[in-house]
Image (spheres, rainbow, N blue to C red):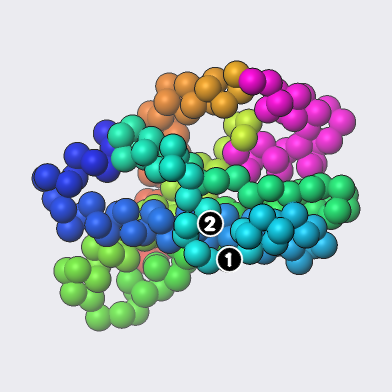
């Protein structure tokens, strides 16, 4: 179920989740762009992506899909692997999930040590949950996700080549969406388990 159903049932939750998602996706894409830029690739900066402005990173179709179907995506950051050396793409791909993990850790620390109201608890647990989901989900070795790019960087001549060839096919995007949709129960179980571990570590589960 998408976020749009919350507009009538729980408008406050809709606003909190929507803002948390926008900020988290923005940081995720900025991390990709910033890392590529620091590694010597000017492509993201030329495309205006080395910024924390959400408008530079949000994809209209991805946002609509998120509202309707409950999963979506931001605009991919354009990079040129030839400008970054052997392990450049690995670090660029990993930067997004790492940024979400750092946000989740920060939210967990605030939950642990700040005096909380009902609203701040809701906001921080939402931020924590969303960023754990984004980090774990993007690390899955599914084509077009960061996990696939990491695999491609580690095994460039075998799995990496096969993944890159698949991503270049015109039907790849649709097929990946179908895979993600059909695999939602498994993906939800994985992300829910990791989120539970994080909450347990700070004594909130």
Q: Is residue 83 above or below residue 113?
A: above
Is any atom of residue 113 visible in this view? yes
Q: Is residue 195 magenta?
A: no
Query: In this orientation, which residue lies closer to the viewer: 142 or 193?
Result: 142
x, y (%) of residue 163? 72, 28
Q: Secondary structure at mark 2?
A: helix
Q: Is residue 10 above or below residue 172?
A: below
Label 2 CA crowd tier, 10 Å (few <14, some 14–19, many 20+) = some
Query: What number of labels is visible?
Result: 2
Q: What residue is pinned by disc 2?
A: 56
Res 41 quadrant in image: bottom right
Give the CA distance from mark 1 to mark 2: 7 Å
Q: Quadrant of the N terminus?
A: top left
x, y (%) of residue 44? 69, 56
x, y (%) of residue 42? 78, 59
User: Magenta stretch?
Assistant: 145-170
Q: What residue is pinned by disc 1?
A: 51
């Amino acid at each position: 179920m998408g976020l749009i159903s919350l507009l009538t049932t729980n408008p406050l939750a809709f606003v909190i989740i929507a803002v948390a998602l926008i900020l988290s996706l923005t940081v995720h894409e900025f991390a990709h762009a910033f890392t590529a830029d620091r590694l010597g690739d000017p492509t993201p900066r030329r495309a205006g992506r080395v910024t924390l402005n959400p408008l530079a990173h949000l994809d209209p179709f991805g946002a609509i899909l998120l509202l309707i179907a409950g999963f979506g995506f931001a605009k991919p950051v354009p990079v040129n692997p030839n400008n970054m050396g052997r392990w450049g793409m690995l670090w660029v791909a990993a930067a997004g999930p790492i940024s979400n993990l750092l946000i989740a850790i920060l939210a967990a620390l605030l939950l642990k040590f700040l005096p909380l109201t009902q609203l701040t608890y809701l906001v921080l647990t939402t931020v924590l949950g969303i960023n754990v989901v984004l980090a774990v989900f993007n690390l899955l070795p599914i084509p077009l996700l960061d996990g696939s790019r990491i695999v491609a960087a580690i095994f460039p001549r075998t799995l990496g080549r096969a993944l890159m060839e698949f991503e270049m096919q015109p039907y790849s995007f649709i097929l990946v969406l179908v895979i993600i949709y059909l695999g939602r129960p498994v993906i939800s179980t994985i992300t829910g388990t990791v989120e539970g571990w994080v909450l347990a570590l700070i004594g909130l589960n």
